[in-house]
Amino acid sequence: MEYLGCIKKSDFDKLNNKEKDTFLLKNGFFSNQELISLDHGVEHFMNNELVSSKMQFIAVPELIDDFYDFLLARYDRLIIPLYSNLMTDLNDDIYGLEYKEQKKIALNYFNDSYGLFDMYQFHGLNTDLSNDIINISQVERFGMIYLNRLNRKNRISTRKFIIEFLVGNVKYFNEKLYLEDDLILEFVALEANILFLQNVNNIFNFEIDRYFSQYAKLSELYENYTHIFNSVNVFIKVYETIKELKVKIPVNIVSLYETLIELDLIIDNKTDFKAYLLNVHNIELANIPKKDDEDDFTPHKKRVKKMIKDFQDLTSTN
């Protein structure tokens, strides 16, 4: 945690409230931001009928993210049992049933859990959060949940909580606070439900999770390598292929590189590809030799032939 305990409590406590705010502002922990209220719903937002706008003294995004990660780790011992209880209830209801019936019951559980997040009148939004833009289209539920979580991250990052975090008062965030504070209580319950929704979705494939899944994490990582890979799908396929390699890793990667070049799925730049291997997979290759002069029956060419079949479908998406 980058920000945890970065302020000396004894020095900070000597300041009055105004001096504390000045200190937090000048040291980049907080900023004054104009916040827009959407309490009357999305339709007012889309019609430029903003309900209210006011300046608020709030923590900077990097600090909010760090604090939220701290809360996830701190209250993990409460989140996991709640999540386990949800899974146990579902498993008890679907045990011994045919898959079709299991999926029908699981969908009811999924919808009930999802309903806990549908409380800010954003129903029907497909959240394209790049550049902080919200686009209206078909419902994408994990996008809704992600947007809800962003809202909660800001609401739970109160001045009081953030200061306790900054001065390193870890013991303040205990089970007593969980029982007494509605923000912490809601945080634990909804994070348990996020885990539940992810797991149920992984089992029954209700929708593509573009926000919390491995797909989401790799999509974010892909943004650092758009100069190499032709699409996010190519990036993910290459990532998963390399992760699955257990033996003869260097020669398999050489064959993979030739496959990707032959199918025009990456930019032919060995230096950049080797940097990707080192940074993402911790694999260091001295060289990626060309194998053009080999006949079709060498181990390398056989590997390339097999890999071409594995990657062929991606050529139609580029």
Image (cartoon, rainbow, N blue to C red):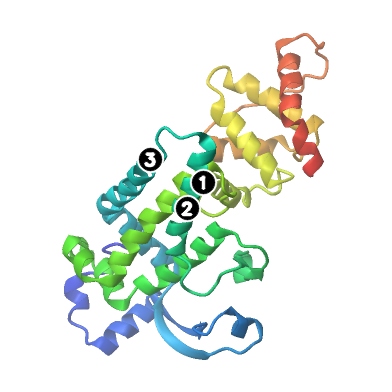
Label pair 3/1, CB-CB below 8 angstroms: no
The answer to which of marks 2 and 3 sits earlier in the sequence is 3
Q: Element at badge 1?
A: helix
Per the image, the residue denoted by label 1 is: 104
Q: Where's residue 36, x and y in %?
A: 52, 84
For badge 2, the amino acid type reads Asn
Quadrant for residue 12, please give it.
bottom left
Q: Are marks 2 and 1 in contact (CB under 8 Å)?
A: yes
Spatial CA span between label 2 and label 1? 7 Å
Place residue 20 in its image quadrant. Answer: bottom left
In the displayed structure, 55 sits above or below 79; it is below
Q: In the rendered view, does 211 fall on the left or right side of 189?
A: right
Q: Is residue 16 visible in the rendered structure shown here?
A: yes
| Label 2: how many Cα within 10 Å (few below 14, some 14–19, many 20+) | few
Residue 203 in sight here? no
Query: Residue at coordinates 39% horizontally, 55% vertically from top-left?
Result: 193
Mark 3: amino acid:
Asn
Tell which circle, 3 or 1, labels the residue nearer the N-terminal end.
3
Q: Is residue 162 left or right of residue 105?
A: left
Q: CA distance from mark 3 to mark 1?
A: 13 Å
Picture residue at 38% right of the left edge, 42% below the top: 93
Q: Secondary structure at mark 2?
A: helix
Q: Which residue is mark 3?
A: 91
Looking at the rendered image, the quarter that the N terminus falls into is: bottom left
3 vs 1, front mark: 1
Residue 25 versus residue 166 in the image, above or below: below
- Residue tagged 2: 108
Give the class, few, some or many, for how many residues have Cα within 10 Å of label 3's Cα (few <14, many ≥20).
few
Check if mark 2's residue and mark 3's residue have beta carbons within 8 Å: no
Q: In the image, what residue type sits under mark 1?
A: Lys
Q: Position of residue 227 (x, y in %)?
A: 71, 48
Instruction: Using the numbered discs, state the Cα–Cα distance from disc 2 to disc 3 in whole angstroms.
Output: 13 Å
